[in-house]
Image (cartoon, grey):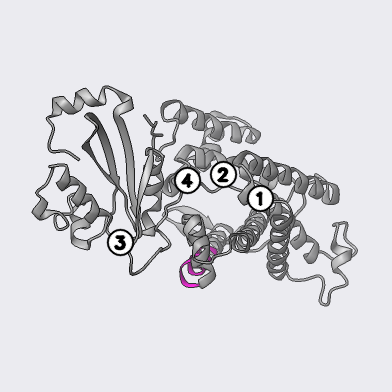
Amino acid sequence: MTKYKSTAEVMKIISDKDKIRTFGVIAHVDHGKTTMSDSLLAHSGIISPSSAGNALAMDSMKAEQERGITIVQANVTLHYQEDDNDYVINMIDTPGHVDFSGRVIRSLRAIDGAVVVCDAVEGIMTQTETVTRMSLEDLAQGEIGLFGGYVALAMASPAASFVAGAALFSNLPGHPYNLWVSVFLALIVAAILAVALQWVVMRDFDESTPQRALNRSIALLICVSAVISSQWGGRARIFGELFPSESGDFVGVVGARLRYTTIGAWVVVLIACGFVTLFLSKTKAGLSFRALTDNRGSSVLVGIQPKKFMAIGWGISGALAALAASLAASMSLLDSSLMFRTLIYALAAVTLGGFDSLRGAVVGGIIVAQAQTLIPGYLGLPSEMSIVAALIVLIAVLVFRPWGLFGQRPVERV
């Protein structure tokens, strides 16, 4: 590194793209990323050598200085000279805490290489190597959940009914079961089915390209949907009531009627979210699963088995999908396209909000729900056109923000 260059000299260098390099500094929290960045800044003449290691110049936010951690990635341009050739090096100091992994991912998309900093005492930690591979969303979970919904219906129906599978479950003691008991048992069946399909169809996900994995997921969706249609047909069926739904079963809120079915569905969803949160934050399996999804390379190095925890993730997703299918069917009807419509709405919501933003997915879901509910009503369109209204809103937003409302604009590498 050489000493300070004027702005005009730096601008002359960066006019040649071959003279530009971009790298990131990545490590576990408190392993010395920002301290090392200080040393590079001092060697480049940007800060005083006597303050290197104490200035923490890349941590400019007040919260970062008070807590002593990097929260937001920061970048600076350095000058480098080798063999009488001048280069401009863009350095990005990234966060080390696992909660800010999304910001690290966005930084990695813009760099040519990375400097990995490891603490010699603590060794390689979970966040030492940051996520470089995005998770692939499984498109078949909705159909697995729908299968669970039909299993719940069969368990709650008498053997003499025309529901496929009811005669099979009639051999179990106590059949037919209460609807809530049937839903609970269906969650177990859906979880086992999801794990089995993951083990057979998606087991070598690690060795698959994203395109192959996506193709398998779509093929799995079609196969499960075909099994459902062949066993239960396309006719809509009455699922049953999980919550009171008589005409007087509602609560008045500021002049509006909030029905028990809506309240009950929200309570169940919040309870399910609470259980998932506790699992991911308080159990060894949950923490291992988070480590695997956030930092696959380091997780393998510390002994976490990817295939085992991917199967656990599929099982949880299958159970939650079955719960979602049961709740949706109890408030409408159970038919073979129930979760496929939900998948379309979900993809529209995530695309609208931004694929890399959890907040965006929530806001996108609210916008899509309001659009498909209100637009047909105000414009006098038939209910079958509700999905078209949602997609029109999606297209209108993406014309102006292709990366979504809260998504990050893609960064092109130079």
Q: Residue sitting at 85 percent across and 51 percent down?
A: 231
**Which residue carries the number 3 mark?**
31
The answer to whether residue 211 is above or below residue 177 is above
Q: CA distance from mark 2 to mark 4?
A: 9 Å
Residue 142 is labelled as 1
Q: CA distance from mark 2 to mark 3?
A: 39 Å
Q: Residues within 10 Å of mark 1 (few under 14, many from 20)?
A: many
Residue 329 is labelled as none
Q: Amino acid at mark 1?
A: Gly
Looking at the rendering, the stretch of residues picked out in magenta corresponds to 271-283
Front-most of residues 165 and 7: 7
Q: Amino acid at mark 4?
A: Ala
- Please provide percent x and percent y for residue 24: 33, 45
- Please provide percent x and percent y for residue 326: 67, 58
Does residue 400 show up?
yes
Front-most of residues 291 and 194: 291
Q: CA distance from mark 2 to mark 1?
A: 10 Å
Residue 346 is labelled as 2
The answer to whether residue 372 is above or below residue 233 is above
The answer to whether residue 276 is above or below residue 393 is below
Q: CA distance from mark 1 to mark 3?
A: 42 Å
- Please provide percent x and percent y for residue 99: 38, 57
Q: CA distance from mark 4 to mark 3?
A: 33 Å
Q: Give SS at disc 1.
A: helix
Q: Amino acid at mark 3?
A: His
**Which residue carries the number 4 mark?**
361
Q: Amino acid at mark 2?
A: Ala
